[in-house]
């Protein structure tokens, strides 16, 4: 009767833990790894040797050495130039593609305009074309671990099917399977919601590093949230959690693309801002930024629109703060621009809605990773298989 994991299973777990540490934390000395992982020096040495033999990490003597400091501890670095993932972000108005090296380094990238309403069968060839273009610049001897896709919409966790992305016009779109067909069987494809992957990226290596309770609000036309509670991502039973844009906040409000009325995104999304600014025919990120610019220049109608939408943003954030008691709320996508334009209004409404105990420690932030958060988070989807079992996946 088996009583516990075998020595080989323990070794593979330790290999994954070490590789994950240098992937997320960057160059780390062997001495620091012994402390961080709770393993002895000889075990760390053996693990790093295995990972180095597989081409996943390298070791070197640190460049900066103090006099009389004794024998230096070798520094372990991820092989960012040799090991990479392909990352894609499917947004309402654009497509992004990148090659991300182990350690979260953006090695190459492409951006394409995206006509609204483009279905998966039309989108996948564009992404595949961007990947093939980047692949021509990849040096020989590299390791590709797969591809990750961040998409605005409800993504079924088990197979990456996009159940609903109303502003893109997608219903039950198999974007993962479609792109996998384009890329070939040697490139596994994983799909997740953009707010979820942004939350993961900022929690792992961005503004929320060290915070175990985080809400990442992502906005464009719609609004979603990536939620981390107790250090773990909350995605719900089927993977559809975080659709905060469809909280009903105004029962007398406007109809929503989801079929309901008065959803939060109808008060803070792109359409709400442009309508309030008396620009109902405009659309897209540039149109949204033009409203903020007009408000900065003193346009009274634009200023009123920013205050109105900012007030609703603070109202919804206050409810989320009461529900999840986060340490940090991060505003990404167009929510970043809205928050920066209406920070005082957001904070004022938040203070009036949220419970004082929940407000005590919450911090409002913009993404440290900026526009790279979605791509870096998408790459993490592909890296996960490697980090779980480095020698098997490599």
Image (spheres, grey):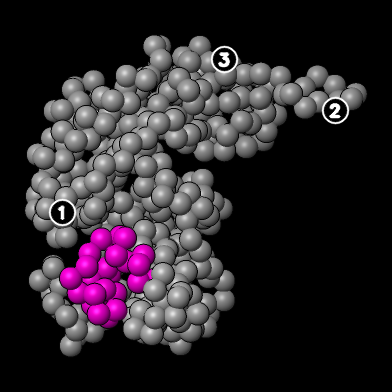
What is the C-alpha distance between the residues marked 2 and 1?
Answer: 58 Å
Q: Earlier in the sequence, mark 3 or mark 2?
A: 3
Circle nearer the viewer, 2 or 1: 1
Q: Which residue carries the number 2 mark?
A: 66
Q: Is 288 contained in the magenta span?
A: yes
- Are discs 3 and 1 less than 8 Å apart at CB? no
Quarter placement of the C terminus: top left
Q: Is 251 contained in the magenta span?
A: no
Q: Which residue carries the number 1 mark?
A: 116
Question: In this rendering, does residue 243 appear at all?
Answer: no
Q: Quadrant of residue 160?
A: top left
Looking at the picture, tell me which residue is in the foreground, 295 or 53. Answer: 295
Q: Earlier in the sequence, mark 2 or mark 1?
A: 2
Looking at the picture, tell me which residue is in the foreground, 279 or 73. Answer: 279
**Crowding at mark 3 (Cα within 10 Å: few <14, some 14-19, many 20+):** some
Circle nearer the viewer, 3 or 1: 1
Q: Main secondary structure of the magenta part?
A: helix
* Magenta segment: 269-292
Above or below, 321 against 50 in this view is: below
Q: Which residue carries the number 3 mark?
A: 49
Above or below, 219 against 21 in this view is: below
* Residue 4, percent from left and from top: 43, 29
Q: Quadrant of residue 261?
A: bottom left
**Crowding at mark 2 (Cα within 10 Å: few <14, some 14-19, many 20+):** few
Above or below, 360 against 213 in this view is: below
What is the C-alpha distance between the residues marked 3 and 1?
Answer: 50 Å
Query: Residue at the location (15% across, 45% down)?
Result: 161
Q: Is residue 279 left or right of residue 329?
A: left
């Amino acid at each position: 009767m088996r009583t516990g994991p075998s020595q080989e299973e323990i070794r593979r777990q330790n290999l994954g833990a070490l590789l994950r540490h240098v992937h997320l934390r960057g160059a780390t000395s062997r001495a620091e790894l012994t402390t961080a992982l709770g393993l002895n020096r000889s075990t760390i040495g053996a693990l790093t040797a295995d990972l180095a033999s597989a081409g996943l990490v390298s070791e070197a003597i640190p460049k900066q050495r103090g006099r009389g400091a004794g024998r230096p501890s070798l520094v372990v670095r991820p092989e960012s130039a040799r090991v990479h993932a392909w990352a894609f972000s499917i947004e309402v108005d654009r497509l992004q593609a990148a090659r991300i090296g182990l350690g979260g380094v953006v090695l190459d990238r492409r951006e394409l305009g995206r006509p609204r309403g483009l279905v998966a069968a039309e989108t996948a060839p564009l992404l595949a074309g961007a990947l093939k273009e980047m692949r021509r610049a990849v040096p020989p001897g590299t390791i590709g671990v797969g591809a990750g896709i961040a998409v605005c919409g409800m993504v079924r966790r088990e197979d990456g099917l996009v159940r609903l992305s109303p502003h893109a016009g997608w219903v039950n779109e198999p974007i993962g399977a479609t792109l996998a067909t384009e890329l070939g069987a040697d490139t596994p494809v994983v799909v997740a919601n953009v707010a979820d992957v942004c939350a993961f990226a900022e929690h792992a290596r961005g503004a929320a590093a060290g915070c175990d309770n985080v809400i990442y609000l992502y906005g464009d036309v719609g609004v979603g949230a990536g939620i981390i509670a107790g250090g773990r991502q909350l995605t719900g039973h089927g993977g559809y959690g975080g659709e905060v844009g469809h909280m009903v906040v105004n029962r007398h409000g406007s109809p929503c693309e989801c079929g309901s009325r008065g959803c939060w995104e109808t008060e803070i999304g792109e359409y709400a801002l442009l309508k309030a600014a008396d620009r109902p025919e405009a659309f897209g990120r540039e149109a949204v930024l033009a409203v903020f610019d007009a408000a900065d220049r003193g346009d009274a109608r634009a200023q009123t629109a920013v205050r109105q939408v900012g007030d609703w943003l603070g109202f919804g954030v206050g409810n989320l703060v009461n529900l999840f008691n986060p340490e940090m709320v991060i505003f990404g996508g167009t929510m970043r621009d809205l928050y920066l334009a209406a920070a005082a209004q957001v904070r004022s409404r938040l203070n009036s809605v949220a419970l004082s105990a929940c407000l005590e420690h919450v911090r409002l932030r913009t993404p440290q990773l900026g526009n790279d958060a979605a791509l870096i988070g998408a790459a993490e989807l592909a890296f996960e298989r490697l980090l779980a079992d480095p020698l098997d996946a490599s």
